[in-house]
Image (cartoon, coloured by chain):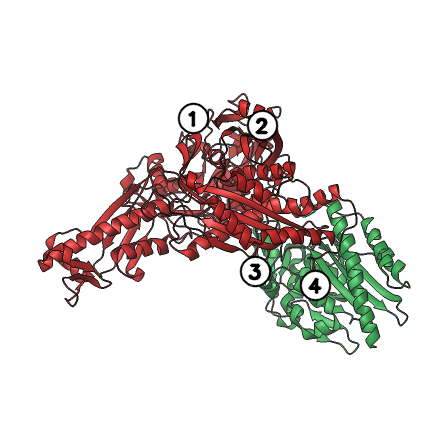
Chain colours: A green, B red
Amino acid sequence: MKPAAFSYARATTVDEAIRFLAMHGDESRLLAGGQSLIPLLNFRLARPSVLIDINPASSLAFIRQRTDGTIEIGALTRQRDVERSALVSRACPLLAAAAGHIGHPQIRNRGTVGGSLAHADPAAELPLALVALNGEVVARSGKGTRIIAGSDFFLGLWETVLGPDELVELIRFPALLPGSGWSFAEVTHRSGDFAIVAAAVVLTVGAAGQITSCSVALSGADSRPVRLGDLESNLIGSVCSEDAFARAGEVAEALPFRADIRGSESYRRRIAAQLIRDGLVRASQMALRAGSRR
Amino acid sequence: MRSPFACARIKSIDVSAAEDMPGVAAVVTSATLGFDRSLPVMRDHAGLKNPASPQILAGTMVRYSGEPVAMVLAENRYLAEDALEVIVVDYEELPAVIDASSAEAGAAGTVHEWMTDNLAGSFTQRTGNLDVAFAAAPRLVTFSCSIERGSAQALEARGIAAVPEADGVRVWASTQRPRGIRILLADYLSLPLDAVHLHVPDIGGSFGSKAYLYAEDLLITMAAVRYQRPVRWTEDRAENFLATYPEHVQVFEVEVGAEPDGRLIALRVRLLHDLGAYSPYGFAVCQNTADHVVGPYGIPNVEFSCRAVYTNKIPSAPYRGAGRPQGVFVIERAMDALARALGMDPAEVRRRNLIAPDAMPHDTGLDTPAGRLVYDSGDYRQCLDIALRESDYDGWRARQRELRAGGKLVGVGLANYIECSITRPHEAARVALRPDGTFRVGVGVSAQGQGHETVFAQLAADALGVPTTAVMVAGAAEEIVDTVGTYASRSTIMAGNAVVGAATALRGSLEATAASIAGIDPRYVFAVADGIVPGDVGTDVLRWRDLYSAAVELGLALEAEHVFRSGAWHVSNGAHVAVVEIEPVTGQVRFLRYVVAHDAGRVLNQQIVEGQVLGGIAQGVAGTLLEELAYDESGQLLTGNFMDYLLPTSAEVPEVAIYHLETPSPHNPLGVKGAGEGGILPTYAAVLSAVEDAIGTPLSRVPMTAARIASAIRRMAPTQVPALENAGSQ
C-alpha cells in the first residue's frame, strides 16, 4: 500500500498554510500528525494532489488560559501534551481524560488536537469532548476568521463544516464551573482502540443538590458525536438520584444506534445506557463533593 | 494485482496501459507466465480424492478474493501500484460459496467447475467398535461446536528477493522450509539445484504461514531469471491479509458415550473442514485434528471422520498448532459437556479419564497415515494436579459461589492436551572447527524467532566442552541435504539431536588428532574451553586454532556431520487452568488467574521454552476472544486490517504462571519433546470453558467475542445488570 503521487508543500506559518489552501483548495489536504491521513493515503482512499505540511508552523502549538478561565489550544498541539497539561487538567479535566483514551502514547505523541477534530472520526475522543464541553473551533481562511460552536462543527462521518480553504487555528474550551463533576468513559475491544461507545458527562449541582446544568454526549450512536438534549433538559432542576439516572439510561436506550463491525445496534445501545447511567452517578458524586467544599 | 471477487470468470485482461506507465519493466499475466503448471499440493493423503492446486496467476477463473491475477515489475512499489490501477480486467462475477456447510450441501454451486460437488475428500480414523460401545454406554452426550482460528499474522510479513547470476539465481526468502523451497524453485525454473542459492535471513515470525512455495516466491524468482534484473517483493499488511494463507473454520458433531462415573467409553467425531479454494497443504491440518482428538485420555472406542470442502476463500495453511488446537478443543468440550450432564466437577471427569503414567507407552489403537499413534511418555495426572494446585482450583470453586451471589460472573476453565510433533524423516547438522578456533554449526532448519541459535549453540558447546560464545550457528545451511524444515515443533528434537551427534563426533576426531600430534594414546587427551590437553593436567593446551592448522597440515578432518532420523511420536502434554471474570453488559473477559503445567520432556533452555508457551497463549487467548476473519456473503474479508482484526496487546493477555514437569522422551538421546505449540493448543478450550462456566450456559463457538458473550448472557438472564467494572473510565 503506497500513496498515489502528490506534491508536498511545507508551511512554516499559518499565513503560508492559508495561502497554500487558497491556491489548492479541494485538491489539497493538511498534514498535521498524520495518524489518520497517512493510512488513508497509503490505502489510496485519500488522493490529494498537494499535501500541505503544517508541522513546521510551530506557532499553532500552544495551550494557554484566558483571564475568564477559558482554555485555548492551538490546532497543532499534540494530544499527549493536552493529556499531560496541568493547565488542562485543572480547568478542563474531562478533556485531559479524553485525550488519554486516544490510541497509544506513540499515537498521541504525533496526533494533534486540530487534526483529530478536522478528521471527524465518529468514534474519536476529542470530537466527543468538544461537543460535551461546549467548546468552539476557531477557523481561518484567506477570507478571515470564524468561530464555530462545537455542536455545529461535525456533519457526519469524516465530514465537518470546514471549507476547503479553511484551517483550524485553535480550539476553546470553557473552564469547568465550580460545583461541577464530570465523567468520560468508553468501551473498546482492546486497550487503545477506537471506542465502540464513549460517553461524556458534565454536571453542575446547586446548593440544594439540584442539577443546575448538565451535558451528556455520546459517540458510537450516530455518524458524529451527539448531545442528548432531551435527557439533559429532563435532568436540569431535578435532584441527583439513582432513579433520575436510571431514567436517563432508559432514554439513551431509546436512541437509534449505528451498527458496524465493532458492534451491533443493540450491543451499542446497552453499553451506552450503562455508560450514561454510570457516568451520571460518577459526575454527580464528584459535583456533590465539589459543592460541599464551596 | 489480486482479484476483487471471490468467484468470477475472467473474460479479458488488458495490461497495455500498465506496460506504458513510467518505471514499469514488465507486466506478467497467466498468458505470459510461461508455466503450464500450478502450485504444488505439498502433502498427499489417501483421503484427498480431489486435490486442487493454487494457480500461480489466474487466467480464466478467480476463486477467492485476493487470488493473484497479474504481476507488475516496476522500479519501486509506488510506480507498480500506479500501474495496477490501469490494468483492465473484465470480470463476470459469479455466486460465491463462502460457508462450509453450504459448500457441503452443494446448493450454492461448486468452487471448481471440474467437480460435481465441493468435497475435496474424506477420511476416517477409528479404533474399537463404536456401535457396540454406544449401544452399551449408560450415558450419552451429543453436541456440536465450531472453531475458526484466524491467521498467523507474523509481525514481519513475507518477502523475497532474487538476483540473477551467471548461470542461475540467488534468492533471499522468508521461509520455514529452505531446502524444499530451493528444490521447488529449481524444478519450476528448470535449473540445476546447484544454480539456485537460497538464503534465509533473520525472520520476524512465521507460525506455519511461511512453509509453502507461494505464487510470489516463484514469480519473483522467475522474473529475476527471465528479465535478468534483481527483483524484490515485500508483502505489506494489507496484502498479507489477502495473500498469506490463514486457517479456516472446522465444524464438529460430537457424540460421547460414558459410564455414570465419568469414564468415556466411546467418542464419535464428525468434522466438516473448510479448505478454502485450494488444497496447498492437502489434509495436513485436519489430519492433525484427527491425531489430537483423543488427547491424554484413554478411550477404547473412537471414530473420527472428516469431510473437507472447498469454498471461495483464500486457501488454508497450518497456523501454529495446525489442527491440533481444534482436536484439543473438541475433546475438552466433550469433557465439559459430560461433566455438566453428570453433575460432576470438570476436573474430576478429566482425571478419571487420563492415561496413567504406568500405562506408558500408550497405544491409542488409531492407525494414522504416519503409523500407529502411540504416546511415548508422560505423567498426565501429575500435570493436571500441578495446574489445579497452583491455580487454587478448589479455592476458586468455593469463592465462585460467593462471588456469583454478589452478582459477579466468575468462571474457572481447564483443559488438558497432548502435542504430537511431526519428526519424520530426518534433520542433519554439520559442526566445523574454523581457522580462528571457533566452531560453526550448520543446520538445515531456519529460525523465525524460536531461539535456534541459542539452543543449538548451547548443545554444541556442551558436547564440545567450549563456551557458547565460541559457537556460531548458521541456519538454512545449503550444505545440509537431509533436512525438511521448521514446523510441527520438531526442530529441537530433530536438529538438536543432530547437532549433539555432530559435535560429539567432531570432538572425538579432534581429540584423536591432538593425540596423534602429541604421540600419545587418545584416551589421555581431553578437551577444555581453550583447546585440547594432550596428556595430564599441567600439559600445555593445544589451542583450537593451532589444532586447526595442524589438522590442515596433516589432512585430518575438521568437521563432522550427523543425521538424526526419527519417525517416532514425540508427545508433549500439559494442563491449563484459566479463571476469568466477565463484565455482563459488554461481555468482556478479564483474567484473574492463568496457570500452565507443561511437560515437553527435558527443558534445554527454560527461558526459551517459557517464551514459546507464553507466545502461544497470547495467540490462543486472542484467537478465542478477539481475532476473527469475518467474510461477507460475497466472500469479502471484513477484517483485513489491524483496526478490525484484533491482535492482542499486552493489556489483553493474562499474566501466566508456568510450572514444568520433565518426562524425557525415550525416542531421542536428549530426551526432548516439542515445545513450539503446546502453549496455544489448550488455550481456546480452557478460555471458552472458563467463560462458559462464568455465565453458566454452554457455548459452542470460537471465536467467542465480547459481543457474543454479552448476547449469550442476555439470552439467559434478561435481569438487571451490575455496574461496568472494566470500562476505561476516569
- The one nearer the camera, B69 or A188, is A188
**Crowding at mark 2 (Cα within 10 Å: few <14, some 14-19, many 20+):** some
Which type of secondary structure does the marked residue at label 4 adopt?
A: helix
Which chain is disc 2 placed on? B
Q: Which residue is mark 2?
A: B137
Q: Tell me if I can see residue B147 in this picture.
A: no
- Give the Cα separation between the discs numbered 3 and 2: 76 Å
- Give the Cα separation between the discs numbered 2 and 1: 32 Å
- The one nearer the camera, B277 or B689, is B689
Disc 2 or 1, which lies upstream in sequence? 1
For residue B46, the mark is 1
Q: x, y percentage for residue B336?
A: 60, 40
Q: Are marks 3 and 1 on the same chain?
A: no
Q: Amino acid at mark 2?
A: Ala
- Give the Cα separation between the discs numbered 4 and 2: 60 Å
For residue A98, the mark is 4
Left or right placement of residue A66 versus residue B353 in this view: right
Q: x, y percentage for residue B115?
A: 52, 22
Q: Is residue B592 above or below residue B571?
A: below
Residue at the location (73% across, 74% down)? A90
For residue A106, the mark is none
Q: Amino acid at mark 4?
A: Ala
Contact flag, marks 4 and 2 (Cβ < 8 Å): no
Q: Are marks 4 and 2 on the same chain?
A: no
- The one nearer the camera, B646 or B163, is B646
* Total numbered badges shown on the rendered structure: 4
Q: Which residue is mark 3?
A: A8
Which type of secondary structure does the marked residue at label 1 adopt?
A: loop
Which type of secondary structure does the marked residue at label 2 adopt?
A: loop
